Structures are given as C-alpha cells and as structure tokens.
C-alpha cells in the first residue's frame, strides 16, 4: 500500500502544529500550577517577590518556546518495507527502529487542543511493550492519522505480524526454518514407524 502523505524510505516530520500544541499545553499547566503561588503573593504586601516570580515564569515560558522549536526540528519518522525508524531529542537524542512484525497495537489519541489544531498522536505498542502502559513509539502531531494507521496496519499484515489492533489476529503464518525442520522430523518418524 502506497501513501501520498507518507512515502516509504523518505523521512517525514510531524505537523508544525506540534509547536503551538506543546506551548498551549505547557501554558495551561503553568497557569494552573502557578495560580497556587501567584494568588497568595498578590494578596500579600511583597510586590517585589511577585515581580521576581512573574519574571521567572516569563523566562521559563521563553525557554520552553525555544526548546519546543528545537524539539520539532530534531524529529523525523521514516517508513520502510519491514520497519519504522524515528529520531527525536534536543539534549538527549533518541532513535529507534520498530519492526512491523513486532507491532501489536496502534492507537490514535487526540485531546481538545489537538482536535482544535486538527492533529493526532499515534501510539504504537510492540510485543515487548504491550503489557506496559507506555507505547514503544509515539508519532506526534500527525494530520492524516487514520491514513497512517491504516498504512502501518497493512505493513504489519504483510510482514506477518498481527493486524495492529491488539486482538492477536495475524496474517497467514509463514513457515519458519524451525517449523520446516519439525515437519521433516515428523515425516521421518512416520517413515521409520511404518518400516518397523
């Protein structure tokens, strides 16, 4: 299966809406948490402390905006015939390879801010991580999330993994070397039993 938006062997980036999404989420959390400090400070007589706290919060917001842009610039994903590759990170770089035949579940998540920005996050779990709460990989800020999920599911089916739904259904089993050896041993045993 080919895709216009997600070509194989070509790195693709998330939507640039990732930047406002992360900033808006950060600001909402910051406003909520800082209200517990700012409200008591504004009621007290220490205006100097309030100004320092507000200045610190403003500096924190500026640093987060810079970090968000650097984070977005560091991200890419790439689909191959048998695996996905990804990279991200500003200070600590992370790269990974996820073989399609290890994928057990593909979920799409979209919060209220993401819905407004028309982006989604795809969480992919593999056989080694499916029992845990976190995903092996998250493909963040994707505009055509349904299309990408179906593309990955088709690649999972082709490589002999599950179907990406977490149901355990798999494509037609491929004969492995161990299975072929077992079948040969059974045939030899039957031949020996008939001659005795």
Image (spheres, helix red, strand yellow):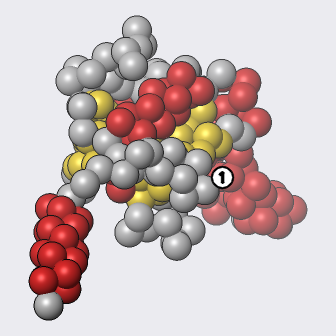
Q: Residue at x 27, y 22 (%)?
A: 8
User: Does 180 sit left or right of 119 as displayed?
Assistant: left
- Residue 25 lies left or right of residue 187; in this view the side is right
Relative depth, front residue between 184 and 102: 184
The residue nearer to you, when weighing 68 against 132, is 132
With 182 as the anchor, is 30 left or right in this view?
A: right
Q: Residues within 10 Å of mark 1 (few under 14, many from 20)?
A: some
Task: Kindly identify the residue that appears in the image at 41 percent across and 64 percent down.
Answer: 127
Q: Is residue 164 left or right of residue 176?
A: right
Residue 149 position within the rendered picture, expressed as x and y whole percent measured from the top left: 52, 33
Which secondary structure, mark 1?
A: helix
| Res 73 quadrant in image | top left
Vertical order, 187 against 193 (above or below): above
Q: Nearer the viewer, residue 87 or 62?
A: 87
Number of marks in the rendered image: 1
Q: Is residue 67 visible?
A: no
Q: At 25% from the left edge and 54% from the top edge, which residue is drawn?
A: 175
Residue 185 position (above or below residue 27): below
Per the image, the residue denoted by label 1 is 30
Is residue 106 shown above or below 6?
A: below
Whether residue 99 is visible: yes
Residue at left offset 41%, top offset 59%: 126
């Amino acid at each position: 299966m080919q895709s216009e938006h997600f070509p194989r062997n070509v790195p693709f980036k998330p939507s640039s809406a990732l930047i406002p999404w992360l900033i808006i989420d950060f600001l909402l959390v910051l406003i909520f948490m800082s209200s517990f400090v700012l409200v008591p400070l504004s009621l007290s007589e220490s205006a100097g402390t309030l100004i320092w706290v507000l200045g610190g919060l403003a500096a924190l917001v500026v640093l987060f905006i810079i970090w968000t842009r650097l984070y977005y610039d560091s991200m890419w994903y790439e689909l191959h015939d048998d695996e996905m590759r990804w990279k991200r990170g500003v200070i600590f770089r992370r790269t990974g390879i996820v073989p399609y035949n290890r994928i057990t579940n593909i979920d799409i998540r979209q919060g209220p801010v993401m819905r407004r920005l028309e982006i989604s996050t795809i969480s992919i779990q593999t056989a080694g991580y499916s029992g845990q709460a976190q995903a092996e990989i998250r493909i963040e800020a994707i505009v055509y999330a349904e299309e990408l999920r179906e593309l990955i599911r088709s690649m999972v089916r082709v490589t002999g993994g599950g179907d990406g739904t977490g149901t355990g259904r798999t494509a037609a089993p491929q004969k492995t070397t161990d299975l072929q050896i077992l079948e040969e041993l059974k045939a030899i045993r039957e031949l020996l039993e008939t001659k005795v």
